[in-house]
Amino acid sequence: MTNQITTRVWVEDQNPVLRMGLVACVEAAGLTIAGQSTGVLPEPSAVGFDVVLFHLTTDRLRWSAEFGMSSSAGLIAVTDEANGNLAAEALRHGCSGVLVRDEITAQTLAACVGAVLAGRASLATALLPDLVSQVDDRPFRPGWQRLTEREVDVLRLVSEGESLRSIAEALSYSEKTIKTVIHDVVVRTGCSNRSEAVAMAARERLI
Amino acid sequence: MRRVLLGDFGEIVGLGLQEAIAGRPVEVVGSASAPSTVVDGISSVLPDVVVLDLALPGSVELAAEISTAFPAIKVVLCSSDEPIMRIYPPFHYGESHVTELDLLALVDSVVT
């Protein structure tokens, strides 16, 4: 269990006024400032803090990934705007938390730090609409994970407009076998017909 | 005590500004929540310095307007985006110059 009073935060922002504002917010949240810097990010090997709160721009993602891999300190990125893509990139590059600058308050900051120290990711609410709209909302069809190599070969040729006979010749099967293979895929994946099965396979990038 | 009127800033920048000038011989006489209220605010509190957000659209025009209408007032604009600031010195009637946003320079520009 973490004692909030001793949670040490390093604050960085290239803009000194923003840096001071973040520092004030950290202190208002009841956390301790381990140090602060303007335009200079801590080395991955640096110690003395539990969390780094820094201004994230795309040119800093690489540092973020390296730091995230080498340091045990939690990384919280502050973005200028509510950009879902940048937030997703931040999470992929070592950050555990992403906050939007204009939405930060002492409460949201304290909650984010708490979550990050407990090993959870934490995203500013303002980022959610953007991120949720990117989620794939196609229905989940379990059969798609288990296409055999033969089924893939057949479906690919069907998608190229080949006739059953030419597919049979190309793969050295009988026409009846080809029909059966197609039928099995259609039934197993819950499609209504062969065309739908081919279309779904293409969308799933299986063929 | 110098009287400072703070314009509309985001919470973080606002906090930062207040921290920066805390302990200095300045008195924050008001914070205007919208550009249209800044001019009204000036007439009622008569500040020595007005600080505005450079990143807000229309702030430069507003600064020029204040600088011309109230020549004795210095206007300082600082940005929450780029680390720059624009200063309208008193009695320069709308003329301004841009410098790098350095915290000491910012505080100095407000305090002196």
Image (cartoon, coloured by chain):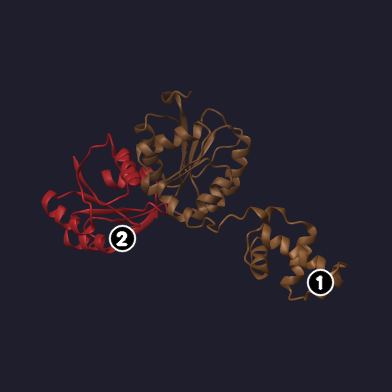
Chain shown red: that is B
Can I make out residue A63 in this image? yes
Q: Distance between the residues labelled 2 and 1?
A: 77 Å
Which residue, given by chain and number where applicable, does mark 1 sit on? A167
Q: Position of residue B101 (x, y in %)?
A: 39, 50
Which residue is pictured at 23% across the width and 58% down the height? B35
Q: Position of residue B36 (x, y in %)?
A: 20, 59
Which chain does the numbered disc 1 sit on?
A: A
Which image quarter holds the N terminus of chain B?
A: top left
Is A174 situated left or right of A42 in this image?
A: right
Q: Where is residue A126 in the image (x, y as percent from the top left)?
A: 40, 50
Amino acid marked by disc 1: Ile
Chain shown brown: that is A
Q: Quadrant of the rendered structure where residue B94 is? A: bottom left
Towards the viewer: A162 or A109:
A162
Point out the frontmost of discs 2 and 1: 1
Q: Residues within 10 Å of mark 1 (few under 14, many from 20)?
A: many
Is A59 situated left or right of A7 in this image?
A: right
Q: Is mark 2 on a helix, strand or loop?
A: loop
Q: Position of residue A198 (x, y in %)?
A: 68, 67
The vertical placement of A123 against B55, above or below, is: above
Which image quarter holds the C terminus of chain B?
A: top left
Which residue, given by chain and number where applicable, does mark 2 sit on? B96
